[in-house]
Image (tube, grey):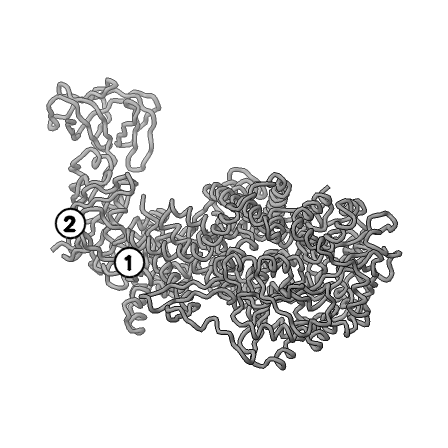
Amino acid sequence: MAAISLEGLFKSYGATQVVRGLSLDVREGELVSLLGPSGCGKTTTLRMLAGLEHPDAGVIRIGGETVAGPGVRVPPEKRGLGMVFQSYAVWPHRTVEQNVAYPLTLRRLPKAEVATRVREALRWVRLEGLASRRPHELSGGQLQRVALARALVAGPRVLLLDEPLSNLDAALREELRAEIAALRARLGTTMVFVTHDQGEALALSDRIAVLNRGVIEQVDTPEVLYHEPATPFVAGFVGGANVLEGEVRDGAFLTPGGTRFPLPPECRASDGPSTLVVRPEDLDLGEHGTPLPLSARLFLGHAAEYRFPVDGTLLRVVGPPREARASQILHVQLRKARLFHRG
Amino acid sequence: MPHNPGRMPFPALVRGAGLALALVVLASCRIESAAPSSDVVATHEGTPSGEVWVYTSMYQHVLDALEPLLKQRLPGVTVRWYQAGSEKVASRLDAERAAGAVRADLLAASDPFFIERLARAGDFLPYASPHVLRVPRSLLDLDARYAAIRVSTMVLVHREDSPPPPTSFAALVDGSWKGRVAIGDPLTSGTAFTWAVFCQARYGDAYFTGLRERGAIVAGGNAAVLQKVESGEADAGVLLLENALTARAKGSHLQVVWPTDGAVTIPGPVALFKSTPNPVAAKAVVDVLLSPEGQRLIVEKGDMHAVDPRLAGPRDEPGVETLLQRAQPWTPALVEQGLARGGALKEAFSRAFSR
Amino acid sequence: MSAPATPLRWVGLAAWLAPLVVFAVGPVVFLLARGLGAAGALEGLAAETGALVNTLAISTGAAALALVLGAPLALLLFRTDLPLRGAYAVLFTLPSAIPAFIWGMGWLSLASPRAGYLNRLLGEGTLDIHGPVGIAFVEGVSGLPLVLLAGGAAMRRVDPALEEAARVCGASPARALLTTTLPLALPSLSSGAVMVFLMAASSFGVPYLLGVSASPPTRVLTTRIYELVLRADEGLGRASALALGLLLLTPVALLATWALGRSGRVRLSAGKGLASRPFALGRGRAVAGAAVALGCAVLVLLPLGALVLTSLQRGFGARLAWGELTLAHWSGVLWAPRTLRATGLSLLLATGAGALVCALGLGAALLQRAFRRLGAGVEALAVWPYAVPGTVLALALLVAFSRDWRFILLERVAFVLALAHTPWLLLVAYAGKYLALGTRNGAEALAQLDPSLAEAARVSGAGPTRAFRDATLPLLRPALLAAFVLTFLACATEITMSVLLVPAGSEVLGKLLFDLQSYADPAAAAVLACAFVALVAVGQGVLALLGRRAAEAR
């Protein structure tokens, strides 16, 4: 049985439709990411799941129980969830211990049990020594750990994470990401994770739902999503592929500006307007192919990124480091690409 | 992300506040039978009893002194005072009259014009107390709608160490006296208004312009005038006799000058409202106020003149009959002027001073 | 969640509106309509332009003075290492904590042209506190804390990173302070100044005390209204017309604060304490310290000293000598049963009014948030009575509630609302008049609160009420406490309305003070004023201590 099921959710604020017919199932113990650019409706979806917003239409079930739908509206406190906010939302007037104990005191557990479970939760997030601190004495990473402990302490059916890492610096983000993965392995909690960072989503998720303008473009495992994007948007957003508009003619792709890319043999397509999606690492620099002037070269260590202006955008190519000057003409060849016909 | 900051658990508190307010309102509500009760206008024949509400401008310490006397003479009666300056009493009464719910049984304010206005509106119950027989006629209403219980007087005052004082109200403007005088504000102070009516009647609007030209300081009420004279801000002042006498008793170096053109007396009348639910007790309170004991308290505690000619004046001043000789007489024309042309007088005064 | 709990929203609005309309707005509108309906209401209004011009000039002057003094002072007290800045912060809030009337009394004894203490030292007529300039000065100084506190709060909210960014761009510390923090705090400072404007425009005590004796007498709208109301005949009509003019100033001033506030509202990031480093004054420290000390001495301590001196003098204006000092007034006033009774009732009423203002103000703030666009109307309605002159509000309540209201239920039982001649009417008047304090404080604080704090509580398993109590309310507490204290202080010595509404047979402090000042002797009034100042000082001290302990506990 699905731990969470969303069916045909709609939500608008005034005239703006934020979520437009979104459906998604999350299995027990699974971690599903909602990935998309800002304004795509992912946070709104999460808030509807939490009960902080009510969908205009559609049904939400958690553990088989309908919590939102026509005539049903279970308030957030009755949904048995845990949630971590982007802004931490750690109450400044309570100590770390009091923050974490809050969900348990609401459940009227005996004091001794509350103390044990708070200690345990603080151990999960490695904050044992800071129980009596006040939030303003903690760093951002520590605050987010408090929020995590608070969300997990009562053993929620589902843990909701709303961009929990985006207020942290890179090193902390890395560290906390590993910690979330470890916690998940340990507790097996079902999680829904909202992020706009594809790296985070790819690293953590069992499956990723890519959202764009209020609808899901694709739901799949990270690998499938990465290698077989269903739409140009997914391809562009996940893995940072180059996306070029143009048309297919005589086994080659022509941009409106007149640049011509011969298509690799396995990428045959009928003529007509198309979108070309190609990852930077699937382009080769060599003696053959389309001659393009180099605009910049970025050294990445194991490789280098080369940028070429094409029709006002930049075509990015990742290949082995080699000597090259700006405005030098290099030849670019497609090794692997995907074509999407435009109707 | 366009989420909605308005979605807070707000109603709880609003409901709480509303509930609390409803409780407050209910707590101050009385619950009674809706059937019109017949005993509201009980006449209380026989011994005076119950409550009597008095709206008055008499000083609080005089009221405090009268309290034991009233308790002793009328053990069954509870007297409730609303005490404020005569102009405040007038405002409050006007508001209550507008609402059609005057709570006062008695009015004892030192504003003859206001009392006359209400008398003409037919608000008062005529009552002649047996004690008024000796009172000088000029202090009584011949239709017995009101009767004075005390007399305040506007006189001139100056500090002992100041240059020669003015000898008359006229001297304040005719140039015979050099110095600065402090006067009350006729626009807000009832007693200053009465004084202004007299001066205008006698010397015309030019009196106000004259005051302005000689640098008179307008102070708010009588206490402000007293303060200006005592502090040396002004050389002389137009002040109520009782304020000057009280200040002297407290050690102030103040001298009283009886103006040669006549002091201005301000009778403080008492009147019964027609709407009183308890006329018997109200009349009894009037009797006590006019009784020799009540009058003595007004002289001794209030430093005002009693209306009973047998009593001496305050602080060894002569009694009320001598006072009336020293003062300018009240005439029907004056009353008419203050009543009908009060607004014009105030206009003239503020025009003169805003120049 | 209660999300689109639309009906509940409306129930809340109704529950909030009902008392406000019945007890404040309704009576005033009724009175004004009556007055305007009377013949001749609009005649002679042309003659009142002087009062209108005076009001505008004095209020603008007061607001400008408060802004000019308050902005640098806020910077010095809250963003620099000025010596003794904690003590100054407390001292400079005194001007608002003590009624303006008392400051007026203090300045009157300091700077009366001939008899003022200062003029006796400096020569006769050097200073004259009477007249528009004096009124604007006293009002401006007594409104100073409104600017100071608003600016201080804003400066503490401004992210220090912004200032650091300016430093990195090459600005000197002083320049960074002046070009980033000050402009960001300016909307709050100006919004405080607008409140000063409103306060000055609707104040009565000071213009009356200092205006009437000026030559020519300075009349402002409120004192004109008072004079006209006292002229029972045709006066009420014209007074209503003037009051209407005064009331129109409220929406204008509110609009100004909104316009200013929109650009300046800095939302506190949730749960993250921002600590900005105080700016080191360096060599300027001594100079700035001396300047602030001088300002404090002249603006705060001097008038209070004058009051104390007045209260100790045997007779007002006596020679300044030890022999002329006496404690007689003190013992005579302080322990009189009358004073004690009045104090008791006043404290009780002020506590009640403070609680009501907090509750209703919080309600208004929540409604404002729930209704957004309509919320502007809610705020306007809540702030509006603040601009109604006390005399008008009191008379309106008298006209409306002198008669008992009978609500007849099932033709058998009648609920009689008998407010007239009870302290309840005073409570109603106080709460109505000062509702603005609760509303503004509550709304400001709520706007700075990240909603996720309450949402986190909801997801943790708390119902809406519980989440509000556990997460929102504790964080609003400082703002509500401030609203309570301000209301309490204002009500404990309120004069204008108290004099008219006080129930027969009882007294309140404000009426006592007014009586002593205008009918008895000023020394006695000064005693009461001093006692009140002492009370406020103790209260402030306790608050400061509590604040420090709370800060330490955090």
Q: Does mark 2 fall on the same chain as mark 1?
A: no
**Label tally:** 2
From the viewer's side, name the closer residue of A300 and B205.
B205
Percent of width and height locating residue C233? 59, 51
Which of these two is toward me, B320 or A28? B320
Residue A307 locus on image (x, y percent): 30, 28
Inter-mark Cα distance, 1 to 2: 21 Å
SS class of the residue under badge 1? helix
Q: Tag 1: residue type? A: Val
Tag 2, which secondary structure?
A: strand
In the drawing, does residue B69 fall left or right of residue C323?
A: left
Q: Tell me the residue at 76%/71% (across/down).
A: B309
How far across and how far down the image is residue C6, in percent? 29, 51
Between C128 and B269, which is closer to the camera in this rendering? B269
**Picture quarter containing residue A65?**
bottom left
Amino acid carrying mark 2 in the image: Asp
Q: From where the camera sits, is residue C277 visible? A: no
Residue B195 numbered mark, or none: none
* Residue behind mark 1: C459
| Residue C286 vertical position relative to residue B50 in the rendered view, above or below | above
Check the residue under mark 2 and report the chain it is in.
A
Residue receiving disc 2: A25
Q: How crowded is mark 1: few (under 14 residues within 10 Å), some or many (20 or more)?
A: many
Most extreme residue toward the front is B143
Residue drawn where x is 44% and y is 52% of the image: C443
Q: Quadrant of residue A338?
A: top left
